[in-house]
Amino acid sequence: MIVNNKTIIISNRLPIKLTEENGEYKLSPSEGGLATGLGSVYKQGNNIWIGWPGIEIPEERHNEVRIKLAKLNLIPVFLTNEEISLYYEGFSNEVLWPVFHYLVTYANFDQIYWDYYKIVNEKFKEAVIANLSAGDTIWIHDYQLLLLPGLIRSELSQVTIGFFQHIPFPSFEIFRLIPWREELIVGMLGADLLGFHTFDDARHFLSAASRLSSSNLSENVLLYNDRQVVVEAFPMGIDSKKFEKLTKHEKVAKFTASIKASLKNIKTILSIDRLDYSKGILQRLQAFELLLQLHPEYIGKLALYMIVVPSRDTVPKYKELKDQIDQLVGNINAHFRTINWVPVHYFYRSFSIEFLSAIYSSADICLVTPMRDGMNLVSKEYVASRVHQDGVLILSEMAGASKELNDALIVNPNNIGDIMEAIVQALNMSTEEQHIRMKSMQAIVAKFDIHLWVKNFMDKLKEVKMMQESLHTKYATENVRDQIAADYVKAKDRYIFLDYDGTLVGFNADIDKAAPDEELYSILKQLTLDPANRVILISGRRYQTLQEWFGHLDLDMIAEHGAWQKQKDTEWKPLPLLTDKWKQEVKTVLDTYTDRTPGSFVEEKSYSLVWHYRKVEEGLGELRAHEILNHLRMLTTDKGLQMMPGNKVIEFKNIEVNKGKAAQNWLYSNNPDFILAVGDDHTDEDIFKALSPEAYSIKVGSNISAARYYLKDYFEVRDLLKELVQEK
């Protein structure tokens, strides 16, 4: 690897706070989890971080700020207050944030928000392109920049791009409500690797992408524009060693002593959140109120420390939420407080990391119950701060962290009774059980820390690029096509095996509509006019259909994957010793699935049955196909049949019927000096495997194949065949 290759990190905000004091700009480090985790990356070598500096900078002072930030490997993207208002406060936080957190009623689908979201993503693209060199790696972060991977990719097709989303990705039914959903998906598909906190988020994205774009899905890989895009879960960690060390800090020790002195004989519950409707703050307060109502024995013995960090409280929805929190805290305190005891200690402000560390290590219970959260690092920070391995974490099942920290008390944040019972369970939990649970969670937090998260993501991104490149080597480039044409011209005896559907014509939902057109007839006619050529059409179609479409041409035909064969100037002959006695039993089963699957149908051929699901709703067809394969697996084995899953089809046929065997029969005792075989399907793999290594085998579509090369689609196949004809 070239030493000068760099990593470019891009996020909405730079990892610093920029403030203006007496006309001078001052920089201070940001305490955010992302800034901490990626600090080790962007500070190395010539790596850089691109983002908005946090405030509007007058144009005449842009250069001054650039120079100041460059010393820290930071590159600013300057945004006006109007851009921030409409792209960030508007589209990012009034469209994407509520929809991605399943609070669609809070979304405001304003066209001007979308216009500015595109404008700002373009600005980021220009900043990236200006700082990009060959061999660099780009890592884009979060929902404010969903269009950026696609914008960069459209200018530089070979660049390496990773994207990580730090908030949840909603299910398809929710995501599809966004008017600009297709553009967002296409933007994200510009990345080579897409990372999410949880498998659920990754699954939701795969579902949305496969429905809203032209991509093809295979497990966790989307094939889009002949490039493989990998989608995976990378649960984000924290710098656990930093939180462990903080507990020994002098300042923290003072804070801890003071907190403990003020809370003699009182158990404490800690709640820390940014002011946001996705955090479940009101429900948490209601659960605490219910606890005091139903368990008066805890009055005077239990206190809730609630820290709410100010956020967007000028926005009506947030102001309304703050008013509701203020009112509920006031009601609880007014109703339950005594002269010596206050039930809720409510702080609407942010605190230093040292004070947070002290409160983490002092609180008996940490209550983290968001309605929906990408990861939630507060839960991990609490666990890392418990150096004596005591304390109880109560965690919402809707937070990504719940997938890892399953020794927490997991609750449904909508169920106030459930949260209350978890608090009671936590208060009564033995020290021994606390130790067992906390020790287990600490091991996870320590192992899967922020540094491993960065390493795992970057390693996977390299792996994805290698996988893509290993496929690219097989593409039939212009040089390869020239070589095929040169060998074609030299050859005296040529065999050309051509599949039909997906190879010479495109797919059609109605199988009878995929008839040959004039261009295809012209290409085949020109190929057959050369006496050195033997053209063999080898298809899964019924022999009657092939006869009707191609019977007038001077070529050989193999139908139904080899069950029927016809050499030019002879009649159709079935493969000897084939039986169709099994068909009725299999067809009865297929008919029951067809009745339950609108859009599917059974095609009957002489010695095979095909279940088609091209017209079936996305997802349902794949589900039914899987059910059919499981249902008929034993029966087909007993009857000596083969099940062949293909492109939106499953074919059942006699095991002797095989395109590879049929091709070998044609080549038997012949020794042509040029062989070309082109096909797009699972069944064509048999031909590719049967041919000699010198033969030119070409798969249509860039799936992994036994073929030597691949072409993208049937247009490229026709172009290749036209080139061969013209060479003569």
Image (spheres, rainbow, N blue to C red):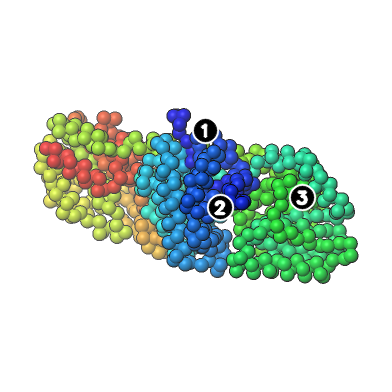
The part of the image, by quadrant, that contains residue 612 is bottom left
**Residue 644 can be seen in this image:** no
Task: Identify which residue is drawn at 55% across, 47% down.
Answer: 14
Residue where numbered disc 3 is placed? 359
Quadrant (top left, top right, bottom left, bottom right) of the C terminus? top left
* Residue 567: quadrant of the picture: top left
Secondary structure beneath label 1: loop
Closer to us: 389 or 717: 389
Say which label, 2 or 3, has the lower sequence index.
2
Q: Are marks 1 and 3 in contact (CB under 8 Å)?
A: no
Local crowd at mark 1 within 10 Å, few (<14), some, or many (≥20)?
few
Q: Nearer the viewer, mark 1 or mark 3?
A: 1
The numbered disc on residue 167 is: none
For marks 2 and 1, give the CA distance.
Answer: 25 Å
The type of residue carrying mark 1 is Gly
**Neighbour tally class for label 2: few under 14, some 14-19, many 20 plus, Cα within 10 Å:** some
Judging depth in this view, the residue of 49 and 440 nearest the camera is 49
Q: Which residue is mark 1?
A: 45
Viewed as shown, does residue 55 lie left or right of 133? Answer: right
Point 38% across, 48% down: residue: 224
Circle nearer the N terminus (2, 1): 1
| Amino acid, disc 2 | Gly
Residue 54: give its label.
2
176, 612: nearer the viewer: 176
Near mark 3 (Cα within 10 A), the count class, few <14, some 14-19 or many ≥20, is many
